[in-house]
Amino acid sequence: MFGRNGIIAGGTIVKDHSGISKATIDRLPVYFRTLRQIQQEGIEIISSEELGHRIGVTPEQIRKDLASFGEFGKKGVGYFVRELIRHVGGILGLHRNWNIAIFGVGHLGWALANYHNFGTIGFNVVAVFDVDPAKIGQVINGVEIDSVDMLEQIVKDRDIHIGIITVPAQYAQSLADRIVAAGIKGIWNFAPVRLTVPDNIHLVSEDLSVGLASISYYLSKNTN
């Protein structure tokens, strides 16, 4: 149902999301994670002040961010934790149950495949690929490792939406090209290389060495 300000869902007006800043969107997963932790503590209602204190964001920023998406909470009372988790999760699309494939079963790929919390937030690891015959056929967290030669068929058969790349840098671009051609629209790249993908593909890259180098810089500045 539509109202003057957007879609009315469960009595809450949810605004059109176009024009929302990237900084606001990037804070939403932090809100979602923190709210889930708060819920596990048995807290049912929380103020923007307390939520901001836990996250390190001002309460004004939290209220502004959430107001970008709709009318949440009750003035003088706060936010109902369960309800806000549902709304923020919906904005993030976590109700969709996205299917994931992991490409590369080194130490990092193996660890990601064994990460049990993916399923609790709507992500399902349904395929794992490698090129090593010694690994193919092994089972990680209930998922059998398949040969990358089967990539295209398995992506189609298992309706895979997101590919996680954990292969060596020299193989990452050609793998990304195959992933895109197979129909995957989201890539989470851990290979230490900049990938080139079409504009309609959402790419997020994590370079662990860059993060460590940044820490090294600040530690060096403070070390006599």
Image (cartoon, helix red, strand yellow):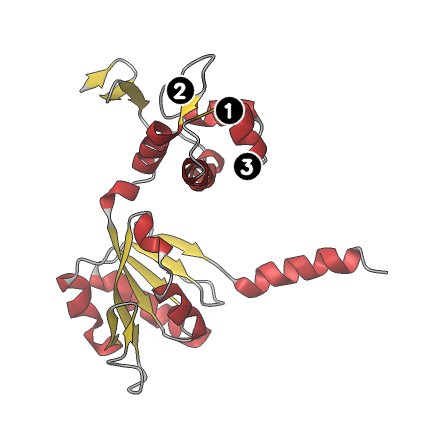
Q: Residue 84, relative to residue 8: is it above or below?
A: below
Amino acid under label 1? Ser
- Most foreground residue, 70 or 77: 77
Give the Cα separation between the discs numbered 3 and 2: 18 Å
Give the Cα separation between the discs numbered 2 and 1: 9 Å
- Most foreground residue, 38 or 51: 38
Amino acid under label 3? Ile
From where the camera sits, is residue 61 visible? yes
- Disc 3 to disc 1: CB gap under 8 Å: no
Residue appearing at x 39%, y 29% in the figure: 81
Mark 2 surroundings within 10 Å by alpha-carbon count, few (fewer than 14), some (14 through 19), many (20 or more): many
Residue appearing at x 45%, y 41% in the figure: 37
Would you say 56 lies left or right of 94 here?
Answer: right
**Quadrant into which the C terminus falls:** bottom right
* SS class, disc 1: helix
Percent across and percent down for residue 216 are: 69, 61
- Disc 2 to disc 1: CB gap under 8 Å: yes
How many labels, in total?
3
Query: Where on the picture, by quarter, is residue 140?
Result: bottom left
According to the picture, the residue beneath numbered tag 1 turns out to be 48
Q: Residue 166, relative to residue 47: is it above or below?
A: below
Disc assigned to residue 73? 2
Amino acid under label 2? Gly
Percent across and percent down for residue 80 are: 38, 24
According to the picture, the residue beneath numbered tag 3 turns out to be 55
Disc assigned to residue 26? none
Percent across and percent down for residue 45 are: 43, 25
- Disc 3 to disc 2: CB gap under 8 Å: no
